[in-house]
Image (spheres, coloured by chain):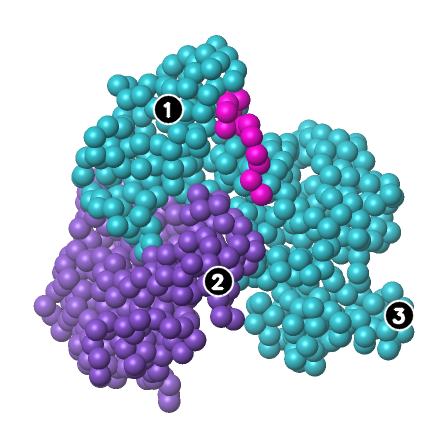
Chain colours: A cyan, B purple
Amino acid sequence: MAEIRVNRLQKNFGEFVAVKESSFTVKNGEFFCLLGPSGCGKTTTLRMIAGLELPTSGEIILGDDDVTFKRASERDIAFVFQLFALYPHMNVRANIGFPLKCDGLSRPEIRKRVEETAQILRITDLLDKPVSGLSGGDRQRVALGRAIVRKPMAFLMDEPLGALDSEFRHVMCNELRALHNRLKATTVYVTHDQLEAMSMADTIAVMNQGVIEQLGSPREIYDRPVSMFVADFIGSPSMNFLNLRTGLKAGSTSIFIDQTSVTIPAVREETAEADLVLGVRPENIFFSDSDGLPGDVFGVEYLGTTQIVTVTTGRGTVKARISSDTKAEIGDRVRLKFRPDKLSIFEKSSGRVLKSALHEGVTHG
Amino acid sequence: MAEVVLSHISKKFGSVTAISDVSLTIGNGEFIVLLGPTGAGKTTLLRLVAGLETADAGTISIGGFDATKSAPSSRDVAFVFQQYSLYPHLTVFENLAFPLRSPIRNMSEDDITAKVKEIAGLLRIEDKLQNRATQLSGGQMQRVAIGRALVRSPSIYLMDEPLSSLDAKLRGDLRVELKRIQHVMGATVLYVTHDQMEAMTLATRIGVMKEGHLVQVGTPREIYTDPVDLYVASRLGTPSINLLPSKDFQVAGIPDTVHTIGLRTEHLQIRKGKKGSIIGTVNYVEHLGDQDYLHISINGHELVTLSNPDDGLSTGDEVSLEFVNALYFDRAGNRVHRGKHP
C-alpha cells in the first residue's frame, strides 16, 4: 500500500479544460472520494491516476515513484469499473485468479491467493459456481475480488455501485467500507452519489468544472461548505438558500430577515456586497409558536420517523426536516426558527462562504 | 375521473399464482401506491386493470361499468411505463398531441393546442415543445411520457415505476411535481413501485403486496406506525426496523406470545452510561450528512437507529437503552397488540 500524491494536475481536451491544476494527497490506507456531478472531471482525474489518460501537465506520485507518464501496466494499481465485466465462460475461481495467471504465478500460489481473497469477501462458497447465475451483488464481489487478489498499491474505483438499486447500494456501501477497514488499502473512489461518499469516505474532494472546490472529511464538508455549490450538492434535501439584502460587518452576530432577527455565527470578515445568501440545512429548522420567519406550508412528505415540510416564505421556498410528531398540514401558517450555530452566509455573486465562528474550533470526525 | 373497484381478483400464469383474491377500491381522486418487491404481483395487478391481462376470477369495475372483459382500448385508462417510449421522429408537441389526434376524439386543432399547452405548463416543459423528443434529457423525456397520459382525461392513470430510470435528484424533483399535478387535476392514480420513499410521499393510501396477496392497505402513516405483520413493518422505514428475538431481552409487561420485538428509532431511548436494564455499546456512527446512523450492539445483536448529532456518542461508548412502545410480533410474524394477553 502507498500514498498517492497528485500535483497541479491538468488535462485539456482541445479547448476544453477537463481538470484544472488539481492537487491532493491520498494518504496511505485512506478511503478517498472524488465527488461531483457528471462532467466535473472526477473520472478524468481517476483515469490519469490509472494511466488510462495522459495529463497535459502536472505530476502523479505513487509511493515514491513518479508514474505521471508510465504505462497503466507499469503502475501497481487495480481498477474496478461500474460494469462488472466478468468473463462469462469462466467460473468465479477462474475469474478471480485470472490476473495472477497473466502475471505467471504458479498454480498453488494462485489457488492460495484466490482462496484468501474469497475469504476476505466471504464468497468462498461461490468459488466453483459459474458467474452467469450470480446476483448483481455477488458479481460485484467477484469483480472486487479480481482487484484485491493482485494486492496492488492502490485501488481505483469508478462508480462501482452505480448499476445497483438504491436500497441494495447502501448495503454494499457498508460492505465496501467494512472491507476497507479489514484491508486498509489506499482507495480512490469516484461517484456522483453524495450518500455513497458520505457513508464511506475518510476524505472527500468535491469537484466542480474541473476544479476541486473543497477537500475535507464528510462532516467538515457537510457542516462547513466553502461554497454554495458544495452546500447544494451535499445533503438530501439540499441546503436551503434564503436571499438577503443586507451588508455585514465583521463581528456581526445577527441579521434581519424582514422584521425577524436571526442569530448567526459571529462573522469574521467584512463584505462590501449587499446581496448575501443565508444557508440553512433542513434539519436545522424548527417550528416556533411565537416568533420566527413566517411562511405557509406548501407540501408535507411523510417519511416515518421524520417528515419533510416545504414552506413558502417571502424569501423563497424552504424545506424543513422535522419530527413526524409535529403537526403540519398544507396551508398552515408557520413560523420558522434556525439553529444559530449551524448557519452559513454566502456571497451571492461568487457563491463563496463568509468566514465566521462556524469555521473555528474542533473539526468533527 | 372515476372510482375503480377490484373485487376478488385472481390470476395464474400456468401453475404460478400471480394474484390471489385481491379486493381494492380506488376512490375518485385517490393516489394509491402498490408497494412490494419484484415478483409480488404489483405490475400484474396494474396490467389487469389496464386490460393487458385478463383475470381468471373476480371483477373489475371502472366508473360503475363492469370492465372485467373489456378490451384495453375501451377501458378509458392511461398507462405510463417505466421506459418512456416516445416517438423519436416527432416533436414534443406532436408527442403530447398524439393521443388527442385519434379520429374517434374528433378534437379541433385549437382545442388540441390549448390542451397540450396546459399540460406542458403543468410539467414545466413549455419551452421544449418544438424540440425533437430525442433532444431531451432523461427527466424531460419522462415528463413528456407522463404528459402524454395527462392530456387525455381518463378514468384512471396507471403508472408502472415511472421514475425508476431517473437519477436520485431528478426522481425527488419529479416526485414532488407528480404529487402536485395529481392534486391540481384531482386525478385518480394507481401507481406501482418498489421504492418505499416514493410510496410514502406520493400515496394517499399504500397497498403492500406480498406473493400475490394484498397484505395491508392504509395511509402511509397507518402502514408505518401500525403494520399488521413483520413483512409490512420491514418494508417501510430507513434505517429499516430492527428485529430482536424477545427471549434475549427482559422487557416488563410483554405478552407471552411475543417472539420478535420490532424497534424503530422512535421506539428507542438511548442514554450515555450504564444505568438501565439493557446496556449496549456503540459500534460506530455512520455519517450520512443530514442523518447519522448509530450502530449499537446489545446482547450479541446489532441495532441501527437514527442518531441525534447532539448526543455526542462515538465508537466504544456504553449506552443504556429503553424500549418505548415497541412493535411486537408472534412466531408467525403477525402483530401482537399491547395489553392483549392470550
Mainly helix, strand or loop, the magenta region? loop
**Element at label 2:** strand
- Which amino acid is tagged 1? Thr
Q: Which residue is mark 1?
A: A263
**Element at label 3:** loop
Q: Which residue is mark 2?
A: B280
Choose between B55 and A298: the one closer to the eye.
A298
Rendering coords of residue A129 (x, y %): 66, 80
Circle 2 crowding by C-alpha within 10 Å: few under 14, some 14–19, many from 20: many
Give residue A134's quadrant in the image: bottom right
**Element at label 1:** strand
Say whether mark 1 and mark 2 are on the same chain: no
C-alpha gap between disc 2 and disc 1 = 38 Å
Seen in the picture, residue A209 relative to B132 is either above or below; the reply is above
Which label lies toward us, 2 or 1? 2
C-alpha gap between disc 3 and disc 2 = 47 Å
Choose between B212 and B270: the one closer to the eye.
B270
Magenta segment: A353-365
Seen in the picture, residue A333 relative to A315 is either above or below; the reply is below
Give residue A143's quadrant in the image: bottom right
Seen in the picture, residue B304 relative to A119 is either above or below; the reply is above
- Which amino acid is tagged 2? Gly
Which label lies toward us, 3 or 2? 2
Rendering coords of residue A289 (x, y %): 21, 34
Residue A204 counted in the magenta span: no
Q: Which residue is mark 3?
A: A105
